[in-house]
Each structure stands twice: as C-alpha cells, then as structure tokens.
Amino acid sequence: MEIDPQEQWNLLIGGDEVATSATYEIVDPSTTAVIGHAPEATVADAEAAIVAANRALPGWRDTPMVERCALLGRLADILAERSPDWATLVQAETGATMKIAQTLQLGGTFVDRFRYYSRPRDLDVAEKPMPAGASALGPAGLVGAVVHRQPVGVVVCITPYNFPLVNMAGKIAPALAMGNTCIIKPAPQDPLGILLLGRAVTEAGFPPGVVNVLTSSGSDVPSTLVASPGVNMVSFTGSSAIGAAIYANGAATMTRVLMELGGKGALVMTDDADVNAAVQAIASVWGFHSGQICTAPTRVICHRSLYDQLVSTLEAVSGMLKVGDPLDDDTLVGPLISERQRDSVEAFIRGGVDAGATLVAGGERPDLPGYYVAPTLMADCTPDMHCVREEAFGPVVVVLPHDDDDEAVSIANDSDYGLFSYVYAGDTARAHSIARRLQSGNVALNSIQPHNEAPFGGFKMSGIGRDRGVWGLEAYSEVQAVSWLA
C-alpha cells in the first residue's frame, strides 16, 4: 500500500470507527518525514471503550470456544492475504529495515500467532477423587473436583514500539480465545499498523466491542484504562518503570497483570566457547532492529582467556555492518525509533566512557538524516557501571571478563533484570548447569533462538507472568475449582 500522509485514521470503539477532533504526527525515523496522523483519543474515548468491552463481555464469554477460535482462524486468513501489503507503511513507522519489516514485523510469526490460538483446547483438569472424613463441614464421603479455566474479563493490551503487530498478536489472540474482550493501546510512535489490524478484526466478523483500538500520544488514556474498575487485567510490554506504575495504579481494584518488562540479557562465554558462534549471536544486537529488542544479548561475560579474541573479532564485525537507508537491501543497521531514543542511547554511551569503559567501536552519530546510532562496543567494563546495569535499547554491547563459572554466574545474576540470557560453552552439559543457576526466565544454550511454545517472561524487574503457547491461554484466565461429595 502507498503511504498517504493525509489519510484519515479512526479509533475502533464498540464496532464503530470513531473520528477524533485531534491527531498527532507519525514520523519515519529514517527520514524524519511525517507519514501520517494518528487519532488522539481522549479520556472520554477510553471510558467509551471500557463500556463497550464490558457490554460485549457476557456474549463473547458464553460463545463456545470452538466458535471464538473459528473467528481467530478467519482473522488469520485475512491477515495472511492483506498484511504483506502493509510492509511499506509498517517499515516507515517503525524504522525497521525492509527485510525486518517483511519477515519479523509482518512475517509468519504475526499470522501464526492468530493461527496457533485458532485451535480449540480443553484446559479443564479433573482432580483425583479423595476420601474425606466426617467433620463439622459435612458427612464423610469421596470428594471429586474439576478445575476450570475462566476468562479474566476486560483486558487492556499495551504494546511497545519495537514490534507492535507481533507483540499485539501475542496478547489478543490468546486473550480472545479464552473469552476475554480487549482494549488495545499501541505505543504512540507507530500505531498505524495496529489500526489496520483493527480494520481486519472488523472484517473477520468479531462482535462489536470484543476488540477496541485506542491510540494516543500522552499518558491520560492509558492511565484511565489502567485505573478503571471496569478493567480486569492489563497486559503490558515495555519499560520496568512504567510497568511498576501500572502495577501500583491497578492495585486498588486488584487488576490482574501480565508484564514483560526491561532486559539486560547476559551472554556467558566459558573458556571452551566457540568465539565465532558467540560473535554471530552478539552481533544480532547491532543488526536485529538496531538493538531495539528486550531479549538482546547486550551484556557479554567472557572468560578472560578468550576476552581479547572476542573483543577484536567484534570490533572487526562492527565495521562490516552497513548503517543506512532501511530501504536499501544491503543495510543491516537502521535508525532508532525517535530523536528522544537516539539521544538517550548517546547519553548511555557517554556515561559508560566517563565511568571508565573503553569505546572500542561506534559511539559516533552517522551523517544521516534520521535517528541513527552506529554499532557500539564498549570493553573493560565492570559490573557496577550504569552501562552494564541498565538497558540501552539500542545497538550497544558491553563486555566484561570472568575467570571461572562461579564468577560468571555471579556477574550475570548481579542485575535487576532477568528476562533472557545465553550460555556459550563447548560442553553442553556444562552450559546447562550454568543456565540452571542463572536468575533468568529464559536461557538459550549456544543459540539465540527461542522456543515459540515455551513459556516466556522474566524474573525480578523483567516482569510478572508467562505467555506463549498454552501458557498464553492460562495467562489470560482465572482458575476455578468445582468440588462435590460423591
């Protein structure tokens, strides 16, 4: 589809497209050109969406799961046909390279998440009958029980700017399959693809109010959603600071939360690690959406015997990665999402150097019109440095030495975060032993590939709860036990 900066985009509330009196600009991060104007929702729009979602909830909850899943399958079919045409727009608003936009923003994973949850599943579990003696509670007998999964209710889904569509699919597909209704709120930087998703939901035939879409540039709308007693759950992906605020704001109404928050992925290299294999994984920080990914291995903890070899190899690789126009086929490193994020990453790098880190590569601002940061490598880092402890969310790698496995584990665990870590070791049994000691929700061994049906989520400040696979259905449900005396 061609980009029309003057196209009118509308909210989706109660099955209707709703125009707003105000809009805000959506900017292409690689050129800084305005590519569209997103609707600026108001608090009144948020309240209307809450009413619509609650009105639709009883009917949707009582719809048999097989029928709910059939609608998800119909949506997957529509997206498989239509979403490839969205690549130009999604690339422009996210700043991703065209390859990333076509394969990871809109590729198979996006559609497959809807397809996966379009298969009905029986999540009920029968408990083994057990004898109960006579008591003040009742006569003796054999007590049976069954455990049911019930929908939570109205779910607010708030997603980040790095992978807006794939992330949203991972939230609403299991939530809808379980019988919840949804209000979806994308990040303000790149919401247009999500508005296209809303149109596809309508075309698929979902009842009015089952899915509602709000976009806004400020905090009033999400704050209204989170604090409302009409919202039963918030599913949020983003920074730990905002996650903590959501947790606090929803406490008064015991709002359920599912949160995937910040990361500072540790990659541990033992003395028998394959340096070239590790380098390929680490370099993904630079070439995979410019490091704007929470699972990136940005904190490398390398055995001292391999340290110099690793640093020199990474330095060489960093110079081979073309930074440039994301529409060029040979570009590997595109822009960051915004001027604010670029400035934040540059300040992060300066802080590391000021603290004593050695700037081995990068650090400079490329002579390009957009929000670029060159692939950056900092060595001679120590665990106490800000650049080691906090997330840059950009193309920055820090490297620390260690002398044995115990020290490596200690350094890796000395972090507020624990989302996704990695272990590279020649001995896979050793790698697994190290992985079991890491305080991280996910650990990959000699690879950066996740298992897409394994539970995903973080320890500590990296989040609460797990999703993906069947775990996603459980995340968007309440547990109900029904017992009886036989």
Image (cartoon, helix red, strand yellow):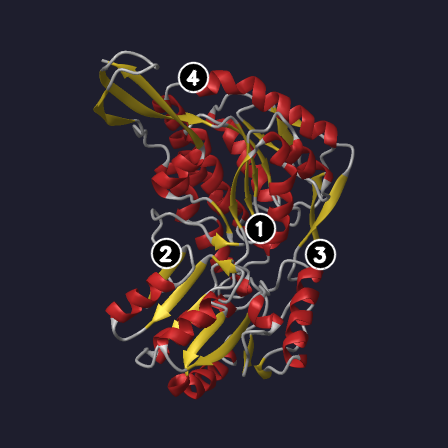
- Give the alpha-carbon distance from disc 3 to disc 1, as whole Å: 25 Å
On the image, numbered disc 2 is attached to which residue? 450
Residue at 61% over, 21% down: 52
- Amino acid residing under circle 1: Gly
Q: SS class of the residue under badge 4?
A: helix
Q: Nearer the viewer, residue 307 or 218?
A: 307
Residue 31 shows in the view = no
Marker disc for residue 62: 4
In the foreground, 364 or 481:
481
For mark 3, does the 10 Å Cα neighbourhood hold few (<14), some (14 to 19), or many (20 or more) residues?
A: some
Q: CA distance from mark 4 to mark 2?
A: 35 Å
Label 1 secondary element: loop
Give me the residue at 51% from left, 59% from top. Answer: 417
The kind of residue tagged 4 is Asp
Q: Earlier in the sequence, mark 4 or mark 1?
A: 4
* Cα distance in 3D space between marks 2 and 3: 35 Å
Residue pictured at 46% horizontal, 86% vertical:
312
Closest to the camera, between mark 2 and mark 3, is 2
At mark 2, the secondary structure is: loop
Q: Which mark is residue 238?
A: 1
Dot 3 falls on a residue whose secondary structure is loop
> If you read the primary sequence from the N terminus, does the residue marked by circle 1 or circle 2 appear first?
1
Give the residue number, with chain letter if any, for mark 3: 33
Q: Residue furthest right?
A: 21
Name which of mark 3 and mark 4 comes first in the sequence: 3
Work out whether 361 lies above or below 480: below
Asked whether the beta carbons under mark 4 and mark 1 sit within 8 Å of each other, the answer is: no
Q: Position of residue 326 (x, y in %)?
A: 56, 63
Q: In which image quadrant can residue 391 be found? A: bottom right
Looking at the rendering, in which quadrant would you find the C terminus? top left
Give the residue type that dot 3 points to: Ala
